[in-house]
Amino acid sequence: MNIIFLGAPGAGKGTQAEKVSEKLAIPTISTGNIIRAALKNGTEMGLKAKEYTESGRLVPDDIVIGIIKERLSEDDCKGGFILDGFPRTIPQAQALDEMGIAIDKVIDIEVSDDAIVRRMSGRRVCAKCGSSYHLEFNKPKVDGVCDSCGGELVQRKDDAAETVLERLKVYHSETEPLKDFYKSKGKLSIVEGQENIADTTSLTFKALED
Ligand code: AP5
């Protein structure tokens, strides 16, 4: 099954993608994680992306489309995959079509802007493996330490309050039109994001069965 997770920054796409990935045993491809890894490793692509991600803007389409093309050609994607954070613009969605990639389901996680701002301020991520936690809603077993790999939990630079507002603005203008794009293809399912992660996961699994 080839699945796309849509939603505002911090809506819970990554959290839900992880659950579905475990259940269906297919990889999650997060353009955000790939870009952050490139930034950390100081690659040419990472350096190009830096000014965009850190100010909350989108990285240019040609860069992210290149990343996705390369990643989807790897063997582990042959039995299905989950896209988390791609596509984010109409040209990116059209590029997927042009690659001949058939999408089975698009899950849009809906969360209000106010709730997004609350969630982002409490998010902490593992500096080593990228796993995501929340100070209130998804606590690690030991404060400041990743459950999966023991890495240090840190706040993402783009989770600063003013950058979150910019990311939300970009989401509404560039990414939200994708809902109509996939609705017109009969692929869109809406999941109302719940206060509790497990409740959202139940709705996500239900949407995948419909
Ligand atoms: P990316 O990493 O994709 O960031 P994003 O879309 O802004 O999404 P997030 O990872 O911030 O949030 P999420 O929806 O996955 O939420 P999460 O599960 O972590 O992209 C970063 C940047 O890279 C972009 O700004 C852009 O510059 C660039 N980029 C990436 N892809 C690109 C593309 N295709 N084109 C161009 N540029 C691109 O949850 C958030 C928090 O809430 C967590 O702490 C979590 O524990 C908590 N939480 C989750 N669910 C719940 C719940 N139900 N109740 C309470 N808390 C919850």
Image (tube, rainbow, N blue to C red):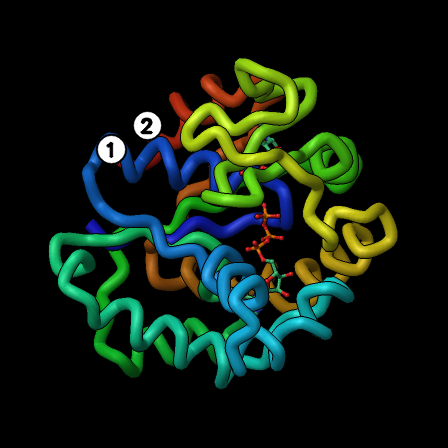
Residue shown at 43% from the left, 35% from the top: 16
**Residue kind at label 2, given as amino acid type:** Lys
> Which sits in the foreground, 115 or 30?
30
Residue under pointer 1: 209
Residue depicted at x 50% and y 61%: 37
Name which residue type carries label 1.
Glu
Look at the numbered discs 2 and 1 and tell me whether their residues touch, using CB distance below 8 Å: yes
Examine the rendered structure and indicate whether residue 105 appears above or below residue 113.
below
- Against 13, residue 167 (above or below) is below
> For mark 1, does the 10 Å Cα neighbourhood hold few (<14), some (14 to 19), or many (20 or more) residues?
few
**Res. 206 mark:** 2
Vertical arrangement, residue 90 with respect to residue 10, above or below:
below
Rendered location of residue 9, percent (x, y): 64, 49
Q: Residue at x 62, y 78 (%)?
A: 47
Secondary structure state at the residue bearing disc 1: helix
Q: 122 or 183, which lies in front?
A: 122
Left or right, 37 with respect to 9, comes to left
- Residue 187 appears in which quarter of the rendering? bottom left
The residue positioned 51% from the left and 22% from the top of the image is 197
8 or 56: nearer the viewer: 56
The local secondary structure at tag 2 comes to: helix
Q: Is 170 situated left or right of 91 in this image?
A: right
Q: Which image quarter holds the C terminus? A: top left
